[in-house]
Amino acid sequence: VLAVARFYALLPAAQIRTFIAIWPALVLIGLPVILVLLQPDLGTASMIGMAGVTVMFLSGLPLRLFVGAGLAGAAIIPIAFSFLHDYQQKRVLIFLDPEADPLGAGYHISQSKIAIGSGGLWGKGFLSGTQSHLHYLPEGHTDFVFATMAEEWGMAGGVALIVALFLLLRWGMRVAQRTDDRFARLVAGGLTTTIFIYIAINLMMVMGMAPVVGIPLPFMSYGGSAMLTVMICIGIIRNIDRNRDALRDRW
């Protein structure tokens, strides 16, 4: 996000609709994406790619480029699927039919749905969830922490958490809108979108609306590196908001 935002901040406005505005940004995004894919870590690579493309969109590139790229990406999905590792292909297939292997590859998502559904409206109570505390739900403290919380606090707790995260995202986008400095605006918008991608993918994953990937839920999942990443994003956005007047003078 920072590198791509810096590139577009230095790019003259007259060149924003030329080819020179595209290929350097794709290099800045593609290099870390390829390196992370080689790990292999498809989830993190997808995060990097989507965050970078978001900054490209916010910079003012023509919408037709993104529509065309989306259609081209959809066309090559069958080819890209063949290059995935066996466990990654299995995750996609299980996403389409979790009941095909309920005790194997589909176990995570099946138990997650059971945990969320069994919480009902008000939940079973703090530390009273059976799926998580009897160890039926795998990774209930990290990737599937929302399922653990929904079982204990119910639909009311889950909706309250989503509303709180929405208010955080709304604040981040308002910071981006109020900032006159082009670089700061792209950074604030890009980092806010990065947090949104974390939230969206994790919630869709635990609800069975997306394949299982190792994406944590911000401020909820256990883990130092994930928490550090999100806190750095929040700190940068907060700094942009606090120094808005100084950035306006520079602009």
Image (tube, helix red, strand yellow):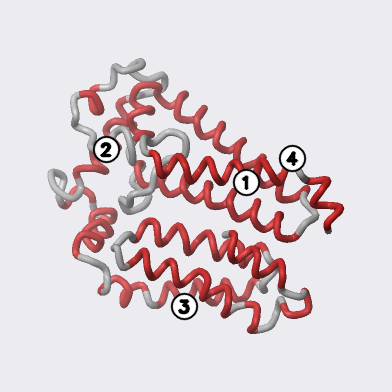
Marks 3 and 4, the one that precedes in the sequence? 3
Q: Amino acid at mark 4?
A: Arg
Helix, strand or loop at disc 1? helix
Left or right placement of residue 36 versus residue 98 in this view: right
Helix, strand or loop at disc 3? helix
Quadrant the C terminus occupies: bottom right
Q: CA distance from mark 1 to mark 2?
A: 30 Å
Marks 4 and 2, the one that precedes in the sequence? 2
Which x, y percent locates residue 121?
41, 22
Say if mark 1 contacts mark 2, CB within 8 Å: no
**Residue 139: mark:** 2
Foreground residue among 37 and 84:
37
**Residue 71: mark:** none
**Residue 236: mark:** 1
Mark 4 highlights which residue? 242
Q: CA distance from mark 3 to mark 1?
A: 34 Å
Q: Residue at x 71, y 50 (%)?
A: 176
Rate crowding at label 3 as few (under 14), some (14 to 19) or many (20 or more) other CA atoms within 10 Å.
few
Mark 3 highlights which residue? 72
Q: Residue at x 35, y 15 (%)?
A: 125
Q: Residue at x 23, y 24 (%)?
A: 133
Q: CA distance from mark 4 to mark 1?
A: 10 Å
Q: CA distance from mark 3 to mark 4?
A: 41 Å
Q: Amino acid at mark 3?
A: Ala
Which x, y percent locates residue 48?
47, 60
Say if mark 3 contacts mark 4, CB within 8 Å: no
Q: CA distance from mark 4 to mark 2?
A: 38 Å
